Amino acid sequence: MKVMRARNKDRLLFAWVRPQGQGKRVRRVKSVAIIGTRGYPSYYGGFETAVRKIAPYLADHDWDVTVYGRPGSTLDADPERDPRVHSVRTRGLETKSVSTLSYGLTATWHALFHKPDVALVMNVANGYFLPLLRARGIRTIVNVDGIEWDRAKWGRVAKAVFRAGARATARFADEIICDSDEIQRRWDRDFGRRGVFIPYGGDVVAQLPVEPGFQHRGYVLVVARFVPENTIPEFVEAAAEIARILPVIIVGSSGYGGPLEAQVAQLAEADPNVTWLGHVSDDRRLLALWQHAAVYFHGHSVGGTNPTLVQAMAMGTPVVARDTVYNREVLGANGHFCAPVPSAIHAAVVALASDPRAQEKASRDNFARSRESYTWEGVCASYDEALTALVEKGPQHAHSV
């Protein structure tokens, strides 16, 4: 059987040519542009992890996939890179305040000329550009992420920008993706939109080696970007006391320097029982750190389903989480929670780290819940279904802007 490729204007066609007398069957390949991440493959954060899973899955399921990114943010030599996924890097301003907007604009501008069937847009800050995509006839689906305008790291102007971007997203997106039920309720209440629920997934891997110099269930771990809403200042204060009982490993950075990084560096230098690894881009090393931790402290407070929490659960890690509606939704009734103050963090972490039976139960409960609700196979299939539903509606019409 021959396979022929042909271009029909902006559409890519595959034609299976059967032997004479059996006719011809044509299958159309759908096209998607992913806008709003640092690119493919990248190991920066949750969006990038999701794209590393979703993009190859879509390529397996009849999608022509293009991922927009930033120069210097991808690993082209990654042995797991799928060559079917097209990586396009556009220019922008690499500053904390305008990087998302500037790269989102240039990626959108590029997509306007190449006209995919649908754009998967990550982050409501890119909601400003949805009218351009709509005017070009491109369907859009937006992963709204967390409630950015509630994050303490942003000033008044940045919060206003994110909230206005959310309003634009609510008005112009064909569909939105919410990664938790609580985020869905918030969008329904604030903007009158109730999107598709698609969380994050976690990888299950075989036994990995323990980080050199440490023991299985012999250390406390935190993995987070250094921003106030991730409870890093409170954990760092608690870590000085926790380190009297167990070693503490801190993974993360701010990405831009600043007082939190200086505080962590000072603590690690002064206390040999505190290790700061900075940003860890080696997935296997990070998975091993979760797999062997006595306790992983999860301090994220304003997201929905957080990718690091779901991944820790998939590794069977005992978790103490900051008590929020989001973390309770993910961990369920058997989770361990604490208030976001140093004394409460210290007490909860030490209590679980000192109780092997409780650790084992937490490990089993977390793993079982991750396999029930947070698998990458289920997540990727849901993205495929949501994107396909939009393509089947046909091109967007400019007059509906």
Image (spheres, grey):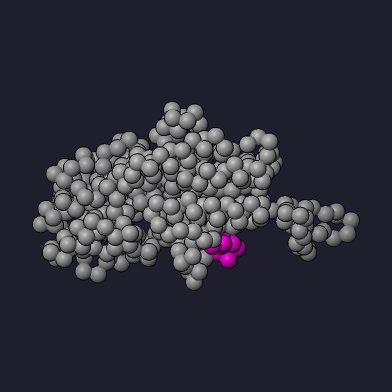
Which one is in front, 9 or 183? 9
Which one is in front, 284 or 46? 46
Q: x, y (%) of residue 178?
A: 46, 39
Q: x, y (%) of residue 263?
A: 19, 58
Q: Is residue 34 above or below residue 140?
A: below
Residue at x 88%, y 59% (from the top left corner): 20
Q: Residue furthest front?
A: 157
Q: Is 342 positioned to the left or the right of 13 in the image?
A: left
- Can residue 292 be found in the magenta stretch? no
Residue at x 41%, y 32% (from the top left corner): 186
Q: x, y (%) of residue 364?
A: 31, 47
What range is drawn magenta here?
A: 82-89
Residue at x 49%, y 59% (from the top left corner): 92
Q: Is 80 positioned to the left or the right of 274 in the image?
A: right
For residue 99, which quarter of the picture? bottom left
Q: In which quarter of the image is the C terminus?
A: top right
Q: x, y (%) of residue 182?
A: 40, 34
- Count every numbered label the image shows and give the total: 0
Q: Is residue 399 above or below residue 384?
A: above
Q: Which residue lies furthest to the bottom in this view?
A: 77
Q: Quadrant of the N terminus?
A: bottom right
Res. 139 visible in picture? no
For residue 261, which quarter of the picture? bottom left
Which one is in front, 107 or 234? 107
